[in-house]
């Protein structure tokens, strides 16, 4: 009851008082509550305090560590799990393959893949098969990923998304787009993640018109409303193609507020293609979003200096001083 109400302090008191007699189910609930609350250390304390643990207990702490960016600890905990003679399940595989990918632990990832097949969870759960595809893609092993993808039964939209995104981020955008076309022909309905993948394919392959067409078809044909990530892909795509004004118009038409990453992509395109007026707008927006980032002030100051606007350079210097913004080492405001 305490866990469901978010009263983790009270839940912990009960756990400590009943530690010797607490059931594994209750222990798992308290641990999961702490992890959901973002307190990994308290989750670990509960885990260590449990007299009896199930595979769910191990999976919960593995997932908690992985999602908190503590991958090396998750890998150590996984090895401890194996040493304790606990056999993993689909949850273990789905949690640990991304950890192996991020840490570059190809050998462990391959072992988990083999375990998944020998234990039967590979054949039983599409989520496991998708995780294997994603692992090989993130390690840049596209041949291995595609072999798994081509031979896997029961593909779902996540399967297609994993392979398309993997091709995109490994620089094979044209093959990713061909796979998207095949996906549509086979009757799968693309979702938001699909379009992040295919638009990224267009970015990395320089397919500007195809990207514009796909962005338009998102709503008109597939009824997927563009999110910030999709607009970010389009700004990057148009900017790389020198269509900076079109990218700026797209930013101004967005139904949501652009974030710093999007303005940064536009700024980069402006500087590459010489659109200084739009660059000035972009960097001013960045200063509003990231007032602590001295690099934005330096970029704006140097842009003014390049155009001989020394009064504006001084204004930026004064603004930095008044805002207690210090330049990073190696940066300079042109005098």
Image: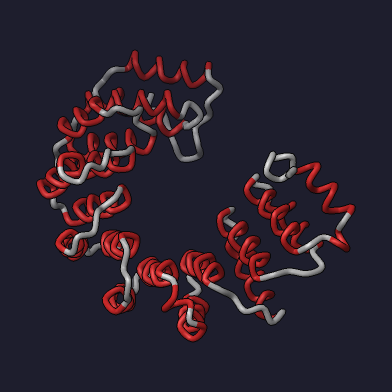
**Does 165 sit above or below residue 209?**
below
Side of 89 relative to 204 (left or right): right
Residue at point 82% right, 60% down?
22
Name the quadrant of the C terminus.
top left
Residue sitting at the far front: 1
In which image quadrant can residue 332 be found? top left
In which image quadrant can residue 255 be found? top left
Residue sitting at the far bottom: 118
Residue 300 visible in the displayed image: no
Side of 82 relative to 123 (left or right): right
Relative image position of residue 262 (x, y in whole percent): 33, 36
Residue at point 23% right, 59% down?
188
Q: Nearer the viewer, residue 189 or 150?
A: 189
Relative image position of residue 85 (x, y in whole percent): 69, 82
Relative image position of residue 154 (x, y in whole percent): 32, 71
Residue at point 46% right, 40% down?
330
Q: Nearer the viewer, residue 79 or 72?
A: 79
Give the mark count. Answer: 0
Residue 238 visible in the displayed image: yes
């Amino acid at each position: 009851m305490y866990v469901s109400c978010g009263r983790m302090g009270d839940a912990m008191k009960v756990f400590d008082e009943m530690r010797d007699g607490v059931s594994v189910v209750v222990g798992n609930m308290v641990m999961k509550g702490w992890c959901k609350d973002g307190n990994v250390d308290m989750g670990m304390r509960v885990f260590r305090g449990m007299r009896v643990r199930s595979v769910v207990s191990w999976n919960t702490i593995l997932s908690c560590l992985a999602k908190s960016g503590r991958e090396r600890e998750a890998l150590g905990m996984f090895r401890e799990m194996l040493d304790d003679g606990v056999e993993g399940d689909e949850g273990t595989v789905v949690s640990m393959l991304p950890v192996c990918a991020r840490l570059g632990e190809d050998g462990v990832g391959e072992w988990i893949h083999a375990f998944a097949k020998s234990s039967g969870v590979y054949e039983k759960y599409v989520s496991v098969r998708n995780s294997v595809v994603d692992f090989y893609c993130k390690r840049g092993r596209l041949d291995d990923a595609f072999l798994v993808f081509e031979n896997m039964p029961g593909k779902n939209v996540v399967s297609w998304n994993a392979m398309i995104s993997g091709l995109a981020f490994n620089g094979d955008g044209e093959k990713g787009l061909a796979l998207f076309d095949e996906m549509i022909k086979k009757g799968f309905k693309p979702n938001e993640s699909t379009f992040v993948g295919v638009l990224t394919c267009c970015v990395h392959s320089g397919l500007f018109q195809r990207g514009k067409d796909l962005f338009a078809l998102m709503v008109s044909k597939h009824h997927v409303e563009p999110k910030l990530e999709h607009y970010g892909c389009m700004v990057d795509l148009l900017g790389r193609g020198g269509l900076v004004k079109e990218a700026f118009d797209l930013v101004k038409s967005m139904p949501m507020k652009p974030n710093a990453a999007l303005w940064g992509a536009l700024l980069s395109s402006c500087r590459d293609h010489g659109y200084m007026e739009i660059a000035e707008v972009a960097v001013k927006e960045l200063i509003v979003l990231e007032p602590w980032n001295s690099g934005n002030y330096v970029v704006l100051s140097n842009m003014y200096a390049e155009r001989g606007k020394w009064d504006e350079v001084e204004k930026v210097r004064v603004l930095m001083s008044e805002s207690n913004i210090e330049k990073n080492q190696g940066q300079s405001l042109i005098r």
